[in-house]
Amino acid sequence: EGPLPRTGGEPCCFTELHVHLDGAIRPETILHFGKKRGIPLPGSTVDDLLKYVSYKTPVTLTQFLEKFNHYMPAIAGDREAVRRIAYELVESKAKEGIIYMEVRYSPHLLANSKVEPIPWGHQEGDLTPDEVVSLVNQGLQDGERDFRIKVRSILCCMRHMPSWSPEVVELCKKYRNSSVVAIDLAGDESLKVDASSEHTKAYEEAERCGIHRTVHAGEAGPAAMIKEAVYLLKAERIGHGYHVLEDPELYKELLRTKMHFEVCPWSSYLTGACLPDFRKHPVAQFRKDQANYSISTDDPLIFNSTIDKDYSIAKEYMGFTEEEFKRVNINAAQSSFLPEKEKQELLNTLYEAYGMVPSTS
Ligand SMILES: *[C@@H]1O[C@H](CO)[C@@H](O)[C@H](O)[C@H]1NC(C)=O
Ligand SMILES: *[C@@H]1O[C@H](CO)[C@@H](O)[C@H](O)[C@H]1NC(C)=O
Ligand SMILES: *[C@@H]1O[C@H](CO)[C@@H](O)[C@H](O)[C@H]1NC(C)=O
Ligand SMILES: [Zn+2]
Protein backbone atom coordinates (compact mmCIF):
# COMPACT_ATOMS: atom_id res chain seq x y z
CA GLU A 1 0.00 0.00 0.00
CA GLY A 2 1.49 3.33 -1.15
CA PRO A 3 0.98 6.74 0.41
CA LEU A 4 -1.61 7.87 -2.10
CA PRO A 5 -5.29 8.42 -1.55
CA ARG A 6 -7.17 5.49 -3.05
CA THR A 7 -10.50 4.97 -4.70
CA GLY A 8 -11.81 1.40 -4.93
CA GLY A 9 -8.40 0.00 -3.96
CA GLU A 10 -6.51 1.76 -6.78
CA PRO A 11 -4.38 4.89 -6.35
CA CYS A 12 -6.54 7.75 -7.55
CA CYS A 13 -7.03 10.63 -8.37
CA PHE A 14 -4.06 12.90 -8.98
CA THR A 15 -3.08 15.89 -11.02
CA GLU A 16 0.45 16.19 -12.41
CA LEU A 17 1.53 19.54 -13.81
CA HIS A 18 5.24 19.13 -14.51
CA VAL A 19 6.35 16.23 -16.67
CA HIS A 20 8.59 16.36 -19.74
CA LEU A 21 7.53 14.21 -22.69
CA ASP A 22 11.13 13.67 -23.76
CA GLY A 23 12.06 12.67 -20.19
CA ALA A 24 9.20 10.20 -19.94
CA ILE A 25 9.77 7.75 -22.80
CA ARG A 26 9.59 3.99 -22.32
CA PRO A 27 13.00 2.31 -22.71
CA GLU A 28 11.35 -0.39 -24.84
CA THR A 29 10.17 2.29 -27.26
CA ILE A 30 13.65 3.82 -27.50
CA LEU A 31 15.09 0.39 -28.31
CA HIS A 32 12.38 -0.24 -30.90
CA PHE A 33 13.02 2.96 -32.83
CA GLY A 34 16.80 2.75 -32.46
CA LYS A 35 16.68 -0.65 -34.11
CA LYS A 36 14.16 0.33 -36.74
CA ARG A 37 16.12 3.41 -37.75
CA GLY A 38 19.60 1.93 -37.36
CA ILE A 39 20.55 4.47 -34.71
CA PRO A 40 23.15 3.22 -32.23
CA LEU A 41 22.17 3.18 -28.56
CA PRO A 42 24.34 2.55 -25.48
CA GLY A 43 22.52 -0.73 -24.76
CA SER A 44 20.41 -3.34 -26.52
CA THR A 45 18.26 -4.42 -23.57
CA VAL A 46 16.11 -2.34 -21.24
CA ASP A 47 18.49 -2.92 -18.33
CA ASP A 48 21.56 -2.00 -20.37
CA LEU A 49 19.96 1.12 -21.72
CA LEU A 50 18.74 2.21 -18.29
CA LYS A 51 22.30 1.97 -16.96
CA TYR A 52 23.19 4.89 -19.23
CA VAL A 53 19.92 6.77 -19.21
CA SER A 54 18.68 6.61 -15.62
CA TYR A 55 20.53 7.04 -12.35
CA LYS A 56 20.03 7.19 -8.59
CA THR A 57 22.65 9.46 -7.03
CA PRO A 58 23.02 13.20 -7.78
CA VAL A 59 24.99 14.27 -10.88
CA THR A 60 25.96 17.61 -12.41
CA LEU A 61 23.73 19.46 -14.87
CA THR A 62 26.07 18.56 -17.75
CA GLN A 63 25.89 14.88 -16.84
CA PHE A 64 22.12 15.13 -16.54
CA LEU A 65 21.74 16.73 -19.98
CA GLU A 66 24.00 14.08 -21.51
CA LYS A 67 21.34 11.49 -20.63
CA PHE A 68 19.10 12.93 -23.34
CA ASN A 69 21.89 12.70 -25.92
CA HIS A 70 22.00 8.94 -25.39
CA TYR A 71 18.47 8.27 -26.54
CA MET A 72 16.89 11.28 -28.22
CA PRO A 73 18.45 10.52 -31.64
CA ALA A 74 16.35 7.32 -31.72
CA ILE A 75 13.11 9.27 -31.26
CA ALA A 76 13.54 12.79 -32.65
CA GLY A 77 12.58 13.27 -36.26
CA ASP A 78 10.44 10.12 -36.50
CA ARG A 79 6.72 10.71 -36.95
CA GLU A 80 5.58 7.39 -35.59
CA ALA A 81 7.91 7.68 -32.58
CA VAL A 82 6.74 11.18 -31.66
CA ARG A 83 3.11 10.20 -31.79
CA ARG A 84 3.71 6.96 -29.91
CA ILE A 85 5.66 8.44 -26.98
CA ALA A 86 2.79 10.88 -26.38
CA TYR A 87 0.23 8.08 -26.47
CA GLU A 88 2.26 5.80 -24.20
CA LEU A 89 2.83 8.53 -21.63
CA VAL A 90 -0.93 8.93 -21.26
CA GLU A 91 -1.27 5.18 -20.78
CA SER A 92 1.48 5.10 -18.13
CA LYS A 93 0.09 8.05 -16.23
CA ALA A 94 -3.46 6.69 -16.28
CA LYS A 95 -2.08 3.52 -14.63
CA GLU A 96 -0.43 5.64 -11.93
CA GLY A 97 -3.80 7.16 -11.02
CA ILE A 98 -3.30 10.52 -12.72
CA ILE A 99 -6.59 11.92 -13.99
CA TYR A 100 -5.28 15.24 -15.29
CA MET A 101 -1.79 15.92 -16.61
CA GLU A 102 0.00 18.79 -18.29
CA VAL A 103 2.88 17.40 -20.35
CA ARG A 104 5.59 19.68 -21.70
CA TYR A 105 8.26 19.46 -24.41
CA SER A 106 10.31 21.51 -26.83
CA PRO A 107 8.85 21.00 -30.34
CA HIS A 108 12.28 21.85 -31.76
CA LEU A 109 14.09 19.09 -29.87
CA LEU A 110 11.77 16.46 -31.35
CA ALA A 111 12.00 17.80 -34.90
CA ASN A 112 14.76 17.45 -37.47
CA SER A 113 13.87 20.02 -40.06
CA LYS A 114 13.92 23.82 -40.13
CA VAL A 115 15.66 23.76 -36.78
CA GLU A 116 19.00 25.51 -36.45
CA PRO A 117 21.10 23.84 -35.28
CA ILE A 118 19.66 20.36 -35.91
CA PRO A 119 19.60 19.28 -32.28
CA TRP A 120 20.62 15.64 -32.62
CA GLY A 121 23.36 16.22 -35.13
CA HIS A 122 23.53 13.51 -37.71
CA GLN A 123 19.93 13.28 -38.84
CA GLU A 124 18.44 15.84 -41.11
CA GLY A 125 14.91 15.20 -42.26
CA ASP A 126 11.56 16.79 -42.91
CA LEU A 127 9.78 16.77 -39.55
CA THR A 128 9.15 20.38 -38.54
CA PRO A 129 8.39 21.68 -35.02
CA ASP A 130 4.86 22.48 -36.24
CA GLU A 131 4.21 18.90 -37.31
CA VAL A 132 5.75 17.64 -34.05
CA VAL A 133 3.06 19.53 -32.12
CA SER A 134 0.36 18.13 -34.35
CA LEU A 135 1.66 14.55 -33.87
CA VAL A 136 1.98 14.93 -30.10
CA ASN A 137 -1.57 16.29 -29.99
CA GLN A 138 -2.83 13.25 -31.88
CA GLY A 139 -0.99 10.88 -29.54
CA LEU A 140 -2.32 12.69 -26.47
CA GLN A 141 -5.86 12.82 -27.79
CA ASP A 142 -5.84 9.11 -28.72
CA GLY A 143 -4.53 8.43 -25.22
CA GLU A 144 -7.22 10.57 -23.59
CA ARG A 145 -9.87 8.60 -25.46
CA ASP A 146 -8.40 5.14 -24.76
CA PHE A 147 -7.33 5.65 -21.14
CA ARG A 148 -10.03 8.13 -20.14
CA ILE A 149 -7.96 10.81 -18.49
CA LYS A 150 -7.57 14.45 -19.42
CA VAL A 151 -4.27 15.72 -20.82
CA ARG A 152 -3.09 19.15 -21.97
CA SER A 153 0.31 20.26 -23.18
CA ILE A 154 2.83 23.04 -22.66
CA LEU A 155 5.39 24.06 -25.29
CA CYS A 156 8.92 24.81 -24.05
CA CYS A 157 11.28 27.55 -25.09
CA MET A 158 14.91 26.64 -24.39
CA ARG A 159 17.13 29.15 -22.59
CA HIS A 160 20.11 28.55 -24.86
CA MET A 161 18.02 28.97 -28.04
CA PRO A 162 16.16 32.34 -27.96
CA SER A 163 15.83 32.11 -31.75
CA TRP A 164 13.30 29.27 -31.33
CA SER A 165 11.00 31.21 -29.01
CA PRO A 166 9.04 33.25 -31.60
CA GLU A 167 7.98 30.00 -33.25
CA VAL A 168 7.15 28.40 -29.90
CA VAL A 169 4.64 31.11 -29.05
CA GLU A 170 3.15 30.98 -32.56
CA LEU A 171 2.66 27.21 -32.12
CA CYS A 172 0.98 27.83 -28.76
CA LYS A 173 -1.45 30.16 -30.54
CA LYS A 174 -2.02 27.85 -33.49
CA TYR A 175 -2.73 24.78 -31.36
CA ARG A 176 -4.40 26.40 -28.38
CA ASN A 177 -7.70 24.65 -29.00
CA SER A 178 -6.15 21.25 -29.50
CA SER A 179 -4.30 20.41 -26.31
CA VAL A 180 -1.77 23.26 -25.96
CA VAL A 181 -2.49 25.49 -22.95
CA ALA A 182 0.77 27.24 -22.07
CA ILE A 183 4.34 28.23 -22.77
CA ASP A 184 7.37 27.25 -20.66
CA LEU A 185 11.04 28.19 -20.52
CA ALA A 186 13.44 25.34 -19.75
CA GLY A 187 17.16 24.63 -19.85
CA ASP A 188 20.32 26.02 -18.32
CA GLU A 189 19.44 28.57 -15.64
CA SER A 190 22.85 30.20 -15.76
CA LEU A 191 21.51 31.90 -18.90
CA LYS A 192 19.59 34.99 -17.84
CA VAL A 193 16.84 36.62 -19.85
CA ASP A 194 16.73 40.37 -20.46
CA ALA A 195 13.99 42.71 -21.57
CA SER A 196 15.00 42.66 -25.23
CA SER A 197 15.41 38.87 -25.45
CA GLU A 198 13.31 36.80 -27.84
CA HIS A 199 12.15 34.86 -24.79
CA THR A 200 10.73 38.04 -23.25
CA LYS A 201 9.01 38.97 -26.51
CA ALA A 202 7.52 35.49 -26.79
CA TYR A 203 6.17 35.70 -23.23
CA GLU A 204 4.73 39.16 -23.91
CA GLU A 205 2.97 37.79 -26.95
CA ALA A 206 1.70 34.83 -24.89
CA GLU A 207 0.29 37.18 -22.26
CA ARG A 208 -1.30 39.37 -24.93
CA CYS A 209 -3.02 36.33 -26.46
CA GLY A 210 -4.13 34.75 -23.19
CA ILE A 211 -1.67 31.85 -23.41
CA HIS A 212 -0.74 30.66 -19.91
CA ARG A 213 2.84 30.95 -18.69
CA THR A 214 5.15 28.87 -16.54
CA VAL A 215 8.94 29.15 -16.23
CA HIS A 216 11.64 26.82 -14.85
CA ALA A 217 13.30 29.04 -12.26
CA GLY A 218 15.06 28.74 -8.92
CA GLU A 219 15.68 25.04 -9.52
CA ALA A 220 19.47 25.09 -9.65
CA GLY A 221 19.50 28.87 -10.14
CA PRO A 222 19.17 31.58 -7.46
CA ALA A 223 16.03 33.41 -6.30
CA ALA A 224 16.82 36.19 -8.80
CA MET A 225 15.76 33.84 -11.58
CA ILE A 226 12.34 33.53 -9.96
CA LYS A 227 12.08 37.32 -9.86
CA GLU A 228 12.90 37.39 -13.56
CA ALA A 229 10.23 34.76 -14.24
CA VAL A 230 7.52 36.54 -12.24
CA TYR A 231 8.19 40.18 -13.03
CA LEU A 232 9.75 40.08 -16.48
CA LEU A 233 8.12 37.01 -18.04
CA LYS A 234 4.85 37.30 -16.09
CA ALA A 235 4.91 33.64 -15.11
CA GLU A 236 1.71 32.36 -13.50
CA ARG A 237 3.48 29.29 -12.15
CA ILE A 238 7.10 28.49 -11.32
CA GLY A 239 8.76 25.22 -12.30
CA HIS A 240 10.54 24.07 -9.11
CA GLY A 241 11.32 27.43 -7.43
CA TYR A 242 13.14 25.90 -4.46
CA HIS A 243 15.65 28.72 -4.15
CA VAL A 244 12.91 31.24 -3.48
CA LEU A 245 13.64 30.52 0.19
CA GLU A 246 16.97 32.34 -0.15
CA ASP A 247 15.10 35.61 -0.65
CA PRO A 248 12.67 35.96 2.28
CA GLU A 249 11.14 39.18 0.88
CA LEU A 250 10.34 37.55 -2.44
CA TYR A 251 9.07 34.41 -0.75
CA LYS A 252 6.72 36.44 1.43
CA GLU A 253 5.43 38.29 -1.59
CA LEU A 254 4.87 35.09 -3.58
CA LEU A 255 3.05 33.53 -0.63
CA ARG A 256 0.84 36.61 -0.57
CA THR A 257 0.06 36.40 -4.28
CA LYS A 258 -0.40 32.60 -3.99
CA MET A 259 2.18 31.83 -6.67
CA HIS A 260 2.09 28.17 -7.59
CA PHE A 261 5.30 26.11 -7.36
CA GLU A 262 5.56 22.92 -9.40
CA VAL A 263 7.81 20.87 -7.14
CA CYS A 264 9.51 17.59 -8.03
CA PRO A 265 11.19 16.13 -4.92
CA TRP A 266 13.00 13.11 -6.38
CA SER A 267 14.14 15.18 -9.36
CA SER A 268 15.47 17.90 -7.06
CA TYR A 269 17.59 15.34 -5.27
CA LEU A 270 19.00 13.74 -8.42
CA THR A 271 19.77 17.01 -10.19
CA GLY A 272 21.44 18.38 -7.08
CA ALA A 273 18.99 21.31 -7.05
CA CYS A 274 18.41 20.81 -3.32
CA LEU A 275 20.47 19.46 -0.45
CA PRO A 276 20.11 15.69 -0.13
CA ASP A 277 18.41 15.81 3.28
CA PHE A 278 14.71 15.54 2.42
CA ARG A 279 13.72 16.57 5.95
CA LYS A 280 15.13 20.03 5.17
CA HIS A 281 13.69 20.14 1.66
CA PRO A 282 11.97 23.39 0.55
CA VAL A 283 8.75 21.39 0.14
CA ALA A 284 8.72 20.86 3.91
CA GLN A 285 8.80 24.66 4.29
CA PHE A 286 6.16 25.16 1.59
CA ARG A 287 3.94 22.75 3.46
CA LYS A 288 4.45 24.50 6.77
CA ASP A 289 3.58 27.83 5.17
CA GLN A 290 0.58 26.38 3.32
CA ALA A 291 2.08 27.62 0.09
CA ASN A 292 0.54 26.89 -3.28
CA TYR A 293 2.38 23.93 -4.79
CA SER A 294 1.95 20.59 -6.51
CA ILE A 295 4.07 17.43 -6.73
CA SER A 296 5.32 16.01 -10.04
CA THR A 297 7.91 13.60 -11.44
CA ASP A 298 9.65 15.88 -14.01
CA ASP A 299 11.59 13.21 -16.00
CA PRO A 300 10.38 9.76 -14.93
CA LEU A 301 12.52 7.87 -17.46
CA ILE A 302 15.76 9.42 -16.27
CA PHE A 303 14.78 9.29 -12.59
CA ASN A 304 13.34 5.77 -12.99
CA SER A 305 10.25 6.88 -11.12
CA THR A 306 6.49 7.10 -11.01
CA ILE A 307 4.44 9.68 -9.11
CA ASP A 308 4.36 7.19 -6.25
CA LYS A 309 8.10 7.73 -5.71
CA ASP A 310 7.63 11.47 -5.11
CA TYR A 311 4.65 11.00 -2.82
CA SER A 312 6.53 8.29 -0.92
CA ILE A 313 9.42 10.67 -0.27
CA ALA A 314 7.04 13.36 0.96
CA LYS A 315 5.36 10.87 3.24
CA GLU A 316 8.45 9.15 4.56
CA TYR A 317 10.75 12.13 5.09
CA MET A 318 8.41 15.10 5.40
CA GLY A 319 5.51 13.57 7.27
CA PHE A 320 2.91 14.21 4.61
CA THR A 321 -0.49 12.72 5.37
CA GLU A 322 -3.25 11.70 3.02
CA GLU A 323 -5.04 14.96 3.88
CA GLU A 324 -2.00 16.93 2.73
CA PHE A 325 -1.85 14.98 -0.53
CA LYS A 326 -5.49 15.82 -1.15
CA ARG A 327 -4.79 19.46 -0.54
CA VAL A 328 -1.78 19.37 -2.88
CA ASN A 329 -3.87 17.85 -5.65
CA ILE A 330 -6.66 20.36 -5.19
CA ASN A 331 -4.12 23.18 -5.42
CA ALA A 332 -2.71 21.57 -8.54
CA ALA A 333 -6.16 21.43 -10.12
CA GLN A 334 -6.88 25.03 -9.11
CA SER A 335 -3.58 26.11 -10.61
CA SER A 336 -4.00 24.06 -13.77
CA PHE A 337 -4.15 25.91 -17.07
CA LEU A 338 -7.59 24.56 -17.94
CA PRO A 339 -10.39 26.97 -18.80
CA GLU A 340 -12.57 27.82 -15.77
CA LYS A 341 -15.40 25.42 -16.55
CA GLU A 342 -13.12 22.43 -17.13
CA LYS A 343 -11.14 23.33 -14.02
CA GLN A 344 -14.33 23.22 -11.99
CA GLU A 345 -15.21 19.81 -13.46
CA LEU A 346 -11.76 18.49 -12.53
CA LEU A 347 -12.12 19.88 -9.01
CA ASN A 348 -15.52 18.29 -8.62
CA THR A 349 -14.08 14.93 -9.67
CA LEU A 350 -11.36 15.30 -7.04
CA TYR A 351 -13.78 16.40 -4.31
CA GLU A 352 -15.91 13.38 -5.03
CA ALA A 353 -12.97 10.96 -5.13
CA TYR A 354 -11.64 12.37 -1.85
CA GLY A 355 -15.03 12.30 -0.15
CA MET A 356 -15.07 16.07 0.23
CA VAL A 357 -17.98 18.46 -0.06
CA PRO A 358 -18.10 19.75 -3.64
CA SER A 359 -17.48 23.44 -4.04
CA THR A 360 -20.55 25.46 -4.93
CA SER A 361 -18.64 28.28 -6.59
C1 LIG B 1 -10.47 28.58 -29.82
O1 LIG B 1 -11.70 28.48 -29.12
C2 LIG B 1 -12.21 29.72 -28.71
C3 LIG B 1 -13.42 29.49 -27.83
O2 LIG B 1 -13.75 28.14 -27.72
C4 LIG B 1 -12.54 30.55 -29.96
O3 LIG B 1 -13.05 31.80 -29.58
C5 LIG B 1 -11.26 30.74 -30.76
O4 LIG B 1 -11.53 31.40 -31.97
C6 LIG B 1 -10.58 29.39 -31.08
N1 LIG B 1 -9.26 29.63 -31.64
C7 LIG B 1 -8.77 28.97 -32.67
C8 LIG B 1 -7.39 29.35 -33.10
O5 LIG B 1 -9.38 28.09 -33.26
C1 LIG C 1 14.01 1.25 -11.41
O1 LIG C 1 13.02 1.18 -10.40
C2 LIG C 1 12.49 -0.11 -10.24
C3 LIG C 1 11.29 -0.01 -9.31
O2 LIG C 1 11.48 0.86 -8.26
C4 LIG C 1 13.60 -1.02 -9.74
O3 LIG C 1 13.09 -2.32 -9.54
C5 LIG C 1 14.71 -1.04 -10.78
O4 LIG C 1 15.80 -1.80 -10.30
C6 LIG C 1 15.19 0.35 -11.09
N1 LIG C 1 16.10 0.30 -12.21
C7 LIG C 1 17.26 0.95 -12.24
C8 LIG C 1 18.07 0.81 -13.49
O5 LIG C 1 17.65 1.65 -11.31
C1 LIG D 1 -3.23 28.33 -5.82
O1 LIG D 1 -3.54 29.09 -6.99
C2 LIG D 1 -4.85 28.87 -7.50
C3 LIG D 1 -4.96 29.63 -8.80
O2 LIG D 1 -4.71 30.96 -8.62
C4 LIG D 1 -5.85 29.31 -6.45
O3 LIG D 1 -7.15 29.04 -6.92
C5 LIG D 1 -5.61 28.53 -5.17
O4 LIG D 1 -6.46 28.99 -4.16
C6 LIG D 1 -4.18 28.72 -4.71
N1 LIG D 1 -3.94 27.90 -3.52
C7 LIG D 1 -3.34 28.38 -2.43
C8 LIG D 1 -3.14 27.42 -1.29
O5 LIG D 1 -2.96 29.52 -2.32
ZN1 LIG E 1 11.26 20.40 -15.70
Image (cartoon, rainbow, N blue to C red):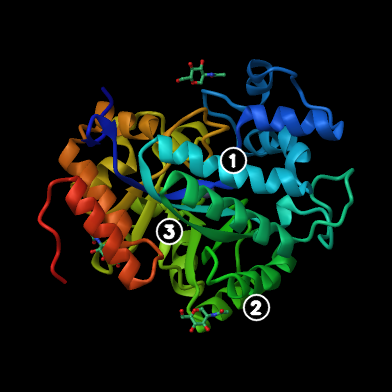
Whichever of callouts 1 and 3 sits on the residue coming sooner in the sequence is 1
Q: Residue at x 46, y 73 (%)?
A: 234
Which part of the image, by quadrant, shows the N terminus? Answer: top left
Frontmost of labels 3 and 2 is 3
Identified at 66% across, 60% down, the residue is 133
Ligand 4 within 8 angstroms of badge 3 C-beta: no
Q: CA distance from mark 1 to mark 3?
A: 19 Å
The percent position of residue 296, horizontal first and vertical second, equals: 41, 43
Kindly identify which residue carries mark 3.
238
Question: Considering only vertical position in the picture, is 339 above or below 125?
Answer: below
Q: Amino acid at mark 3?
A: Ile
Q: Secondary structure at mark 1?
A: helix
**Reading the chain from its start, which is encountered first: label 2 or label 1?**
1
Q: Position of residue 14 (x, y in %)?
A: 32, 45
Residue 158 in picture, x, y percent from top left: 65, 58
* Residue 295 - label: none
Q: The disc labelled 2 sits on which kind of residue?
A: Ser
Q: Amino acid at mark 1?
A: Gly
Whether residue 259 is visible, yes or no, is: yes
**Where is 260 relative to 74, above or below?**
below
